Image (tube, rainbow, N blue to C red):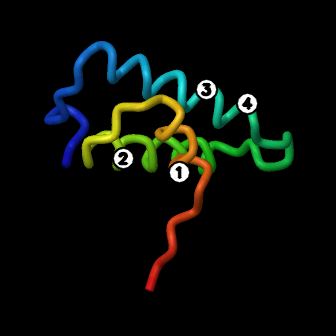
Amino acid sequence: MPAECRDFSSETMRNMQVALEVAWGSLPPQQKVQSNKRLLATRILDAAEAGERSPARLLMLALTPSIEP
């Protein structure tokens, strides 16, 4: 879904921002490349689109690699 079509409340947006900042801050310097930040943000957006609103769960899901079949 294109970013302009997403409709999140201001509280959800704040929770996603906090989750991204904390997740990014938890990475060691050698892992802080733009592609990793994009991946974290994508995981957070996907979780929020699926209905997750808890900042702690958004953070956990951002840092947990998905298992692909």
Give residue 60's position: percent from left, percent from top: 57, 45
Q: Are marks 4 and 3 in contact (CB under 8 Å)?
A: yes
Between the C-alphas of marks 1 and 2, the distance is 12 Å
Secondary structure state at the residue bearing disc 4: helix
Q: Which residue is mark 4?
A: 25
What amino acid is labelled 3 in the image? Glu
What residue lies at 45% left-to-right and 49% top-to-bottom? 43
Foreground label between 4 and 1: 4
Between the C-alphas of marks 4 and 3, the distance is 6 Å
Give residue 67's position: percent from left, percent from top: 51, 74
What amino acid is labelled 2 in the image? Ala
Residue 21 tag number: 3
The tag earlier along the polypeptide, 2 or 4, is 4
Question: Looking at this rendering, what residue extends furthest in the top direction?
Answer: 10
Quarter in which the C terminus is drawn: bottom left
Q: Quadrant of residue 33?
A: top right
The tag earlier along the polypeptide, 4 or 1, is 4
Between the C-alphas of marks 2 and 4, the distance is 19 Å
Up the image or down, 12 lies above or below 30; here it is above
Q: Which residue is mark 2?
A: 47
Q: Which residue is mark 1?
A: 39
> Callout 4: 10 Å neighbours few (<14), some, many (20+)?
few
Between the C-alphas of marks 2 and 3, the distance is 16 Å
> Callout 3: 10 Å neighbours few (<14), some, many (20+)?
some
